[in-house]
Amino acid sequence: MSTSLRLAKVTPENIDAALDLRVHPHQERNVSPVVRSLAEAYAFGETAWPRLIFDGDELVGFLMAFVDIPWNEKKDPTDRRSGLWRLNITATGQGKGYGRFAVEALRDELRQRGATRMYVTWEPGEDGPGEFYRKLGFRTTGELSGGQTVGVLDI
C-alpha cells in the first residue's frame, strides 16, 4: 500500500473525477454510484461526511460516512450511530489496500469525534463485501437495514 494515501473533500476542482469514478462491474449492484452519494450528502447535511480517496494525485475511491444519526428512534431514542455509509474503490484499484485505508482513516476520524463504535451495512451474498468487512474486524449485529447486513466494529 502506498504511503501517499489521503482523504480529501469533494471540491469544484475534483467533482468531475468523483462523478466519473466506477467500481468493478460485478460490484455495481452492491454499492450506489458516487453521484447518488453526493446527492444524499447534500440532503443529509452535517450527518453525511463524503471524502475522496487519493493515492498521490490519482483518485482511487470514495467513501461517505454517517455521523451521529438516530438509528431507531421509535425503539430507542438515545441510539445514535456513526459509521461507513458508502465505499467505492475504482475497478483498477481493487486489492491494493485502498479499502482498508479508507476504513481505518474513517475509524480514526470517528474516534477523534468521540465515537466508540463504527457501523457499516452491506449487501449480503457471495459477491458482496461482507468478507472484506469481517476481515477488518466487523462483526454482524443480527440487524438488517433496508435488507442489508449491519456490522459493528469497536473503536
Image: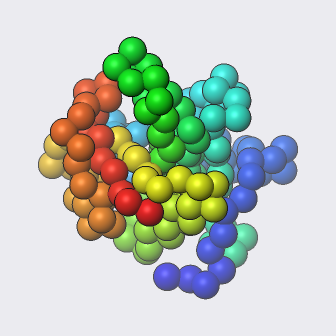
**Which quadrant: the C terminus?**
bottom left
**Can I make out residue 39 in this image?**
no
The percent position of residue 92, horizontal first and vertical second, equals 46, 64
Q: Estimate the x, y position of residue 131 in percent, counting from the top left.
A: 22, 59
Q: Is residue 76 left or right of residue 59?
A: left
> Is residue 129 or residue 110 the one in the foreground?
110
Nearest the viewer among 52 and 59 is 52
The x and y percentages for residue 124 are 21, 41
Give whichever of 93, 3 is nearer the camera. Answer: 3
The image quarter containing residue 50 is top right
Q: Residue at x 55, y 45 (%)?
A: 65
Please say if 36 is above or below 104: above
Measured from the top left, where is residue 95 in percent x and y? 37, 70
Tally the numbered discs.
Answer: 0
Q: Left or right: where does residue 73 sit relative to residue 47?
A: left
Frontmost residue, 73 versus 135: 73
Q: Is residue 122 left or right of residue 111?
A: left
| Residue 19 visible to an observer of this rendering | yes
Q: Residue furthest top?
A: 74
Instruction: Please name the colour scheme applied to the rendered image.
Output: rainbow
Outermost residue to the left: 126
Say left or right for 155 vs 57.
Answer: left
Looking at the picture, does residue 1 appear above or below residue 59?
below
At 70% from the left and 35% from the top, the residue drawn is: 46
Question: Residue at 43% across / 33% down in the picture?
Answer: 79
Seen at 70% across and 30% down, the residue is 45
Location of residue 38 (image quadrant): top right
